[in-house]
Image: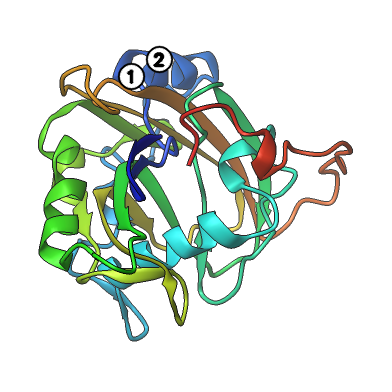
């Protein structure tokens, strides 16, 4: 976490991974090449950056994703194995998260049929909490954009099939927004990053493997790296084990976590 006075610039350690690691995960799962009859590109499964779900734009959905990530009871980027996938989920879009950059995640989740999936490949927000001297939205937008203009590498695989060009899916929030809906005192925020908005997948088992890294300098979060994978059981899975234990609380997050 980079702190300047009361102004915070947080990278979501929520989706940074190297392309090499992400590809090796997919190969370990037997997903290194498309199966016969499978897609040769995952792009047709994705909404374009100018797409909408209902009345919400892609940019509005990313803002709502940040509000979800910051205010659900259990920090989703600390989920060790997917046991908390269902927390805070509502509406037609199901949110997925990465990690805080301190561990590699492999998560298994049951997702209701018919839901869109929103997941960050690599992303950042910049917030201002100084009520006496708030930063203008244009300044927050510029700060959130810095690392996203220096993408090092990125790969996204859906069922082992690669998204052709991740850079096509850069999305900025529609202006600025409060981190807590309806409460401007929680900080005005701008978000920027690379995202996938996946159309509802067929019922059954699917894998989502993501990796990316910024290629900025050593200041701030310019070299943050992370990798994660989801196994998604769309429409339910009767034999999915009920997991015990608890994820770390927000007050137990390592330094640098959102």
| In the displayed structure image, the side of residue 205 where residue 166 appears, left or right | left
Which x, y percent locates residue 189? 31, 62
| Quarter residue 153 falls in | top left
Q: Residues within 10 Å of mark 2 (few under 14, many from 20)?
A: some
All told, the count of numbered labels is 2
Left or right, 98 with respect to 250, comes to left
What residue do we see at 18% from left, 35% from top? 147
Image location of residue 115, percent across then percent down: 52, 67
Q: Is residue 202 visible?
A: no
Task: Work out whether 23 lies above or below 59.
Answer: above
Q: Are marks 1 and 2 in contact (CB under 8 Å)?
A: yes
Please name the residue that numbered disc 2 is placed on.
21
Q: Nearer the viewer, residue 185 or 122?
A: 185
Locate residue 237 relative to residue 4 in the image: left or right. Answer: right
Cα separation, mark 1 vs mark 2, equals 5 Å
Q: Which mark is residue 89?
A: none
Category of crowding for the residue at label 1, using alpha-carbon neighbours closer than 10 angstroms: few (below 14), some (14–19), many (at least 20): many
Tell me: residue 14, above or below residue 110: above
Which residue is identified by label 1? 18
Q: Is residue 32 shown to the viewer in this render?
A: yes
Q: Position of residue 107 (x, y in %)?
A: 63, 35
Give me the residue at 46% from left, 30% from top: 256
Q: In what element is the residue under mark 1? A: loop
The answer to whether residue 105 is above or below residue 133 is: above
């Amino acid at each position: 976490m980079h702190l300047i006075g009361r102004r915070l610039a947080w990278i979501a350690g929520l989706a940074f991974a190297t392309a090499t690691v992400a590809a090796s995960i997919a190969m370990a799962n037997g997903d290194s090449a498309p199966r016969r009859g499978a897609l040769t590109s995952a792009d047709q499964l994705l909404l374009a950056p100018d797409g909408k779900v209902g009345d919400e734009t892609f940019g509005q959905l990313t803002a709502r994703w940040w509000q979800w990530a910051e205010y659900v009871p259990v920090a989703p980027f600390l989920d060790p194995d997917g046991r908390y996938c269902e927390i805070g989920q509502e509406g037609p879009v199901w949110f997925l998260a990465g990690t805080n950059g301190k561990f590699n995640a492999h998560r298994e989740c049951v997702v209701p049929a018919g839901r869109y999936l929103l997941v960050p490949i690599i992303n950042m927000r910049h917030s201002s909490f100084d009520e006496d001297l708030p930063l203008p939205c244009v300044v927050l937008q510029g700060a959130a954009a810095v690392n996203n203009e220096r993408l090092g590498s990125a790969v996204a695989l859906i069922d082992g099939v690669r998204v052709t060009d991740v850079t096509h899916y850069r999305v900025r929030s529609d202006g600025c927004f409060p981190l807590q809906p309806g409460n401007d005192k929680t900080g005005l925020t701008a978000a920027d990053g690379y995202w996938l908005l996946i159309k509802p997948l067929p019922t059954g088992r699917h894998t989502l493997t993501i990796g990316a890294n910024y290629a900025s300098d050593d200041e701030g979060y310019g070299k943050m790296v992370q990798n994660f994978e989801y196994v998604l059981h769309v429409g339910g899975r009767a034999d999915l084990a009920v997991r015990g234990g608890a994820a770390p609380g927000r007050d137990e997050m390592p330094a640098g976590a959102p």
